[in-house]
Amino acid sequence: MNREMIIVLDFGGQYNQLIARRVRECNVYCEVHPCTMDLEKIKEMAPKGIIFTGGPNSVYKDDSPSCPKEIYELGIPILGICYGSQLMAHQLEGRVETAPVSEYGKTEVEVENHSKLFGDVSPKTICWMSHTDYIAKAPEGFQVTAHTPVCPVAAMERPDKNWYAVQFHPEVMHTQEGMKMLSNFVYKVCGCAGDWKMDSFVETTIQEVREKVGNGRVLCALSGGVDSSVAAVLLAKAVGKQLTCVFVDHGLMRKNEGDEVEAVFGPDGPYDLNFVRVNAQDRFYSKLAGVTDPEQKRKIIGEEFIRVFEEEAKKIGAVDFLVQGTIYPDVIESGLGKSAVIKSHHNVGGLPDHVDFKEIIEPLRLLFKDEVRRAGLELGIPEYLVYRQPFPGPGLGVRIIGEVTAEKVHIVQEADAIYREEVAKAGIDKDLGQYFAALTNMRSVGCMGDGRTYDYAIALRAVLTSDFMTAEAAEIPWEVLSRVTSRIVNEVKGVNRVLYDCTGKPPATIEWE
């Protein structure tokens, strides 16, 4: 199926994936690619528009990321954001310099409403700035369409060429009218129709998977989480009984979760799936013994997952494809183009070099979490499953700081169950993007009864987020935290202290490891 597309070229900034997400909110399909993407490939994809992202470098330095100047000759509309705007100015013979005054944070910007980019935008609008360099002089033929007291070229454009540039970040929520600006670029400049919707994604993906698999047999890595559940049902609709879902209980699930997964996807559940449960708790604990480094834990868990799947595949017979519920944030945090590797995900960067399958299928690889949920609803998956709390692939292995042991797993399972129960009782669970308990590696002195204790501290985490790329700590009511704390220290052996994590993402990640 041919679909209109916007391409985002990644120059290494923090918010690159948010740009793609915002474009998709305009019902236009969008992909992120490295800035080194070949021009022939771009022409082949025939995008309706190209967006240059921000980045931490200075365009006038020799080692700064760039793209061929010939990109401006493709006749495709281009929007440069932050670093991308400076690159456009630099390549088209404007002048970029170190700014006399850097700008960071919310800034009032004066814009020209006659610009297609700023149609319906207030003459003075709040935008998010983050730059130490600035465009000192716009290239010949460009009009300056926005400025601040210290940034003479906060936006510029050459409408006859469909080239637009903004020094600020329209993709972040702090830019109050940023969505208007991006929508204006997508519709008024690029001429998109906005016909990409989740029903078309589901229909197209099912057809693509069916064609790729043919008569082959498929093994799906089913964890019971939102991502793998949606992937499993999507594959079941595409290839039916050619699919076998393998659920590996690695002993790092939440309390009673293994049994809950089997109740939903097993032989007595609502889905017509070939379902295999593998109880491999001891095997994973053995592999993780003595390991404290989070990256090493992720890779061990990821590799052991694959090995278990390979073994199950051999029992089933010849299996050609492995399906995983990888989503876009997994791909991004594992490193894309010039972006930094935040952490390896067991279903991306944590995979071993050799995998004994013909091919890995990742049908949700380009979706954000909220898009995965919409796909799940489109597939007819019940809301209680679609809106289930996200759970990392390595499970409690990355919610236990330091070495993983059966005793620590039990502690964090019990504490997490209490936390989730009280949050649900308070009726605030639907408002939270994610919430969980983590076991710190810190022990401290306490006093329980008349005796001295020296036990672990549990950290509680709750965040507000729509896309899981950025998040802020949720303000859980004190009475809820008080009840949770009281229950954990009284009911969970080995814990004498409870903390609440108030850190957003960035600078933290949502998970602790």
Image (spheres, rainbow, N blue to C red):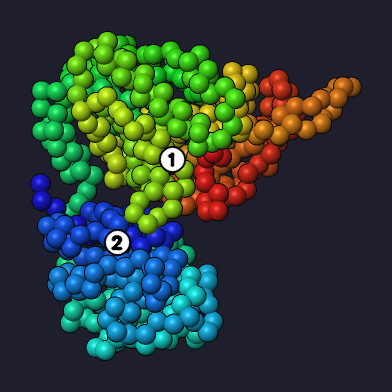
Looking at the image, which is closer to me, 244 or 106? 244
Mark 1 crowd level (few <14, some 14–19, many ≥20, 10 Å Cα): many
Percent from the top left, x then y, of residue 475? Answer: 60, 47
Q: Amino acid at mark 1?
A: Ser
Count of numbered circles on the image: 2
Q: Amino acid at mark 2?
A: Cys
| Residue found at x 42% / y 47% | 333
Q: Please, is residue 316 above or below residue 355 in the view?
A: above
Q: Is residue 117 visible?
A: yes
Q: Which residue is the site of mark 2?
A: 35
Q: Which residue is the site of mark 1?
A: 344
Q: Secondary structure at mark 1?
A: loop
Q: Please, is residue 371 above or below residue 451 in the view?
A: below
Looking at the image, which is closer to me, 66 or 33? 66
| Residue found at x 56% / y 35% | 293
- Give the position of the C terminus as an image quadrant: top right
Q: Secondary structure at mark 2?
A: loop
Q: Is residue 158 left or right of residue 295?
A: left
Q: Quadrant of residue 439?
A: top right
Q: Earlier in the sequence, mark 1 or mark 2?
A: 2
The numbered disc on residue 371 is none
